[in-house]
Amino acid sequence: MIKIEAIVRPERVNLVIAALEDAGCTGYHLFNITGAGQQRGVEVFTGRGAGTVVRTALPKTLISTVIPDDMKDSVIEAIVGAARSAGDGAIGDGKIFISKMDEVVRVRTGESGDIAL
Amino acid sequence: MIKIEAIVRPERVNLVIAALEDAGCTGYHLFNITGAGQQRGVEVFTGRGAGTVVRTALPKTLISTVIPDDMKDSVIEAIVGAARSAGDGAIGDGKIFISKMDEVVRVRTGESGDIAL
Amino acid sequence: MIKIEAIVRPERVNLVIAALEDAGCTGYHLFNITGAGQQRGVEVFTGRGAGTVVRTALPKTLISTVIPDDMKDSVIEAIVGAARSAGDGAIGDGKIFISKMDEVVRVRTGESGDIAL
Amino acid sequence: MDTGTTAWLLTSSALVLFMTPGLAFFYGGLVRGKNVVNTIMLSFMAMAVVGVAWIVWGYSLAFGGANEFIGNFDFIGFRDVDANAGPDAGYSSMIVAIFQMMFAIITPALITGAVAERFKFKTYLVFLLIWMTVVYAPIAHWVWGDGGWIGGIGASDFAGGTVVHINAAMAAVAAAILVGKRRGIPNGIEAHNVPYVVLGAGILWFGWFGFNAGSALAADGVAVNAFLVTNTAAAMGALTWVLLSYLTTGKASAVGAASGAVAGLVAITPAAGDVGAMGSLGVGLGAGILTWLVVKYRHKLMFDDALDVFAIHGIGGIWGALATAIFAVGGIGVIDGEFGLLWANFRAVAATIGYSFVMTFVILKVLDYVPGLGLRVEETEEDGGLDIAEHGERGYVGDGAD
Amino acid sequence: MDTGTTAWLLTSSALVLFMTPGLAFFYGGLVRGKNVVNTIMLSFMAMAVVGVAWIVWGYSLAFGGANEFIGNFDFIGFRDVDANAGPDAGYSSMIVAIFQMMFAIITPALITGAVAERFKFKTYLVFLLIWMTVVYAPIAHWVWGDGGWIGGIGASDFAGGTVVHINAAMAAVAAAILVGKRRGIPNGIEAHNVPYVVLGAGILWFGWFGFNAGSALAADGVAVNAFLVTNTAAAMGALTWVLLSYLTTGKASAVGAASGAVAGLVAITPAAGDVGAMGSLGVGLGAGILTWLVVKYRHKLMFDDALDVFAIHGIGGIWGALATAIFAVGGIGVIDGEFGLLWANFRAVAATIGYSFVMTFVILKVLDYVPGLGLRVEETEEDGGLDIAEHGERGYVGDGAD
Amino acid sequence: MDTGTTAWLLTSSALVLFMTPGLAFFYGGLVRGKNVVNTIMLSFMAMAVVGVAWIVWGYSLAFGGANEFIGNFDFIGFRDVDANAGPDAGYSSMIVAIFQMMFAIITPALITGAVAERFKFKTYLVFLLIWMTVVYAPIAHWVWGDGGWIGGIGASDFAGGTVVHINAAMAAVAAAILVGKRRGIPNGIEAHNVPYVVLGAGILWFGWFGFNAGSALAADGVAVNAFLVTNTAAAMGALTWVLLSYLTTGKASAVGAASGAVAGLVAITPAAGDVGAMGSLGVGLGAGILTWLVVKYRHKLMFDDALDVFAIHGIGGIWGALATAIFAVGGIGVIDGEFGLLWANFRAVAATIGYSFVMTFVILKVLDYVPGLGLRVEETEEDGGLDIAEHGERGYVGDGAD
Ligand SMILES: Nc1ncnc2c1ncn2[C@@H]1O[C@H](COP(=O)(O)OP(=O)(O)O)[C@@H](O)[C@H]1O
Ligand SMILES: Nc1ncnc2c1ncn2[C@@H]1O[C@H](COP(=O)(O)OP(=O)(O)O)[C@@H](O)[C@H]1O
Ligand SMILES: Nc1ncnc2c1ncn2[C@@H]1O[C@H](COP(=O)(O)OP(=O)(O)O)[C@@H](O)[C@H]1O
């Protein structure tokens, strides 16, 4: 089993989720996060609204889904397809992190392994 | 060391935490997430409240705790016991994900290893 | 590649991020979490404000950053330096968890590996 | 009809109406986030349901005819309720009927604090109609109606301590008992949104000027005095709670400050026409201490009055009724050696307690057995929160999927 | 000048001004969290821009001179608008000019619901100035100005059903068409903050007493009656929406309850001087049913009126204008067999619809072509939310980095 | 006593009271989420503490006797403050005492913006009592008291520009200096809840009608004019800030719009009885530009006036006092070639600045040395937020553990 953590723009979440479902993912969960990568922030007002400051970190959404090993490529492809901005993509489109997940247990039944996903 | 990520119903969190403490966990942290698995959503109102739509993802809580390897089974058992709905459990009771954690460092002391948990 | 998850006091986040950037981290993301470790809670009011209860879990911030293997020590050092309270540190200063990250893909370009960090 | 008086009564009516959304926020902030929509709706629907029922039959039942116990059907549909009045009259009957409507709206809304986080919404709508008819209208008649028996024995309830607060509080107790305790919160809950609680308290304080000073039914010295003592009692109540909070825990609860203010406001309600500035400090201080003690130890009670309606409105209201008789100026108060008012107010309180509790108990028992109704939501609905279960809405939508 | 009347008009003016922040919250709660600041600002800036422009030229254009179609420049800069009036007058011309200003402020704010989540803020500021001048002022003159043609044909619009609501709604339709649909929300959105919606509705309800009862321009029986029917129609509208919500889905939407209340308030606006208590129930019921149906099926329309301004204010307003003629008492209503008022109101509605739609369409088309303006934000700005893009602010800052 | 006048003064008093919860939200939205409860409480407790102390001794000190510098003890405990007045009087002394109380409440609440996020709550409660007694009461007496010297030199402060705003602002500067800078925010902070800021501004704007138009102490032409110019200056202030925001950054800050509105309101406060519609545009424009500049460059100042009380209320207030003299109509203004009022107002401003700053400085210095008090919370408390540390409450509870 592997865990895919995709950090995407919040406005892309619905598209990414639809793509995940098409790719056969059976479950996922989302986190609201704030992050910074190459895209380095926006100007925001501080105090009473006359001065500004550059905020490095921006709101992003992290989508986490645990899948069987063999779905890896198709899922990554699905995410990239749905999350990349029109044209050649834009800075801030996001990143996908892949790591190993050793086990999963379904609380309701106690089942474990791929069948529990 | 292993990391246990348990996704449970928000209303079960207090019970699960109590169970974790009984099982000897020394620390944990919680995330508010939104997720979908086999339980596929609820009907919610949109717009001015005359039309509805089915929301796939529901609020869940992710409890993450890092424990020594040998506590794995007892901790999983504790979580399942506290998180499963009365009767035979119900769809949406949650899932537990187990992965390997390589190291931990306590900021205060710089200690690492199981002793830092 | 490794993933560093540092749980720190919310008021230390700006310092830790600055330290991460100095240490050469190219990206990170933050989660608002609630957690408990050895620091066991504060007294809060319940109901209409005449009775109190001790809340175990406290607000913390989890900073997650994925880095090349060789930056591990310097990054941990940077975090500890920025997150530890003045003097000998205090309970609740936080913890750092290190685990293996297998792969990363940049959505915009499709690049993967250390170059995508 | 006097334009100044009419202007003040129009303003007062608007202020009292505004108290109900204020209450919605006060209560809404106190519950858990998964029940905020439901809690707010319980107050808001009182505006909708009673706003309709009052003009159709409520007013007539409460204020029609001259009778000891109940009104009649003379004013059904606001028939013969005149918007105008002759040049000598201060105000018309319609503006008083409107002002009274706002009281009839907020009273059942107050009850909902007791059953927050678990009451079935559909049943609540039915309950609103029946309770307003069977409990509120008669008690309003007793106190303020033509020939009402409580008015007759010389009890003094200036702006509704018995009719509104004690009445709501006893109904709350009956409801809390029948609906049962909430699931799985052995240690009580934290307010999910403290700013909302203070916003609600601010709106209530603001609106209460209409409630009490409007009850003078004139823009005169009585109104001015009522306005003053309303503010003073609220201030003293808030201060008392904060000091008690500080003395016992070293911290000053904002929810407590808001609660103390409301407790002071409740207690001054019956007294606002009879006490002066210094008396109102006594009223507020007593209200603060008593309600604080009851809130602190109420978990020893057998029922789960979730938002402490009994403590704040019941104890606060009873104290207010007695305090009216204690601090009343003009030679009728206990301080002046007179006990007649105390005894009259005591009887008024006792009757209200008994009637409200018993009737509410009966109404809810019946609703519990009506097929399709019942008092309490399913366990899973309660666990997941009433917002989704009963309203198909989450209070706050903040995740990336939206 | 009568002090009671003046007191009530001062109070009413304050109440109507307060409606605009109320609307800001009502609308602000309905959008997604990334657009809450923008949505609130659209209303708030109407206070700023119209608050200035009205005294400089707006009032004069709307209420100067005696003419069928438009005012004149007599009152430019509030010249000759007198704060005082003789002892026999009820009120001075300045207090009426102030009261009217509050209407001129909220009307364009209402429009913004249609273009929420995508309208260019800079263009909006310009639009506010032009629209108030070219659309609002003339229509206000037609209906309420000296010699205005709609007043002349005997149409009855007590507190602004045509001038405010139908006018805003048709402008909303024109704007929604020209600005185009929002990106990527095939199924509509959930309100991001339901408590805000109810808070907004509560403030609107409260302020609407000033809007309608203040339109009596006196603290008299007409004001009292207007106050009553305002409340009743709001209550009935809310109740209707909740019952329809229950019947169709088994759940009671709080946003729906708030929407129904507003729909009832919109519909009673033109009628508040003519209908009685029972008539107002009819007005509210009709408004509830009609607006609910239109909201439910409006996605079949070709344009994205994001917050349903057309359904609530347009349909509600048109129904109100016709319902005025239906339920009017005093022998002028359809129920009494008279159709004259119905026909007059019908013409008033038709003229308002036509003028407002066409003129707004033209104004926006022009603004779209003006270099540096344009109607719509960039796609990435829309995706990321207008709060950051247009205001450099996030509504809520909650992450650890702050 | 006149019912219309009394109605308006009752309404105005309620409106001004409501400003304090409004301020609580205005300030509460501007701070970081971990300090929202504390910030709200600082305002709310002014209602509680001053609400009590004013009737016990504050009013008497400010308005008792005929003396140049301070009142006396004649009205201790509101003794002899009459709720009624004869038929010829417009209003009774009690309603004015109530109206004045609301000013005494909001003034210290304004100060708290300077020390937000770090001031010790316990000390604040003591400070409130002393400051109201030693600073507020005398200055109020100077300006409005019988025989007060500022009133005597012919200075014109219609609704409290010196007494309330300049006074609060200079106390704020003293407090900010003594309490010291907040820890670890080199670049300033973002407002944690922009909607709260706008809600607060909306309530303030609404309540300010009572503040200024109520200061006419009549429902007359002066009140009507004051109402108008209040609105206009607020609108102009907001507009100015938004345009400056746009010109310099291309974005329109909502916090800025709210700040500009408040700045305009502050500046018009002393002027509301003397300037006309066009003059009020000048007042608002000047206030907007000046306060914006000071806010923008105030980080160059040596002290951390966290929420810019000095910029908005100090600069806005000083400008207002001078602008009163510039734009005053009736042949007393600088525009009409008269400089007497300018000079008188200048002296009033200077005296207020000096007295308020010095006395506040002394009071806080003393409180800093009193064992058990002290001005500032512990570092860890400041880091973790004052909500938990001082109030045992979190503003928002949203995690799964609740
Ligand atoms: N090394 C990293 N570790 C953790 N999170 C990261 C890392 N790099 C980027 N991120 C997250 O991914 C998001 C998108 O990254 P970004 O650099 O903006 O995209 P791109 O590289 O395509 O320009 C960031 O906002 C941040 O949340
Ligand atoms: N494959 C998965 N990857 C990530 N999260 C998952 C996955 N499957 C389920 N989840 C999370 O677990 C929660 C419970 O899963 P669910 O399918 O509803 O339980 P069950 O399988 O017992 O019916 C979901 O809401 C989601 O947050
Ligand atoms: N074993 C663990 N698993 C997961 N999270 C932990 C664990 N131990 C601690 N944490 C997190 O780290 C935070 C800091 O830990 P704490 O025990 O307070 O620090 P210290 O050990 O230095 O006193 C906690 O609030 C919690 O969020």
Image: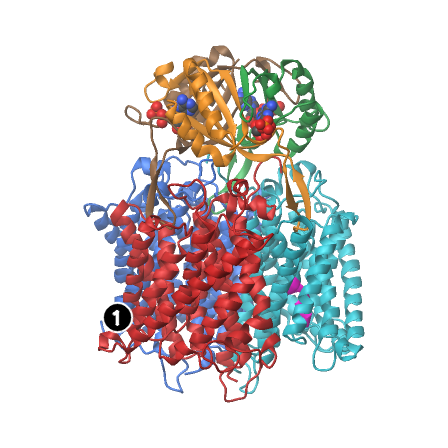
Chain colours: A orange, B brown, C green, D blue, E red, F cyan
Q: Chain of mark 1?
A: D
Q: Indicate the position of residue D178 as horizontal and vertical percent values.
A: 29, 46
Q: Is residue E206 visible?
A: no
Q: How many marks?
A: 1
User: Residue E363: x and y, percent?
Assistant: 50, 61
Is D187 located above or below residue F100 in the figure?
A: above
Q: Residue at x 66, y 37 (%)?
A: F383
As for residue F192 lying within the magenta part, the answer is no
| Residue nearer the viewer, D307 or F296 | F296
How far from the left and from the top, in percent, is residue D39?
A: 39, 48
Q: Amino acid at mark 1?
A: Gly
Above or below, E363 relative to D188? below
Q: Position of residue F288 (x, y in %)?
A: 68, 60
According to the image, label 1 marks what residue? D77
Q: What span is in magenta?
A: F264-272
Question: Could you classify mark 1 by the number of other residues whose Cα lies within 10 Å: few (under 14), some (14-19), or many (20 or more)?
Answer: many
Q: Is residue D336 left or right of residue D162?
A: right
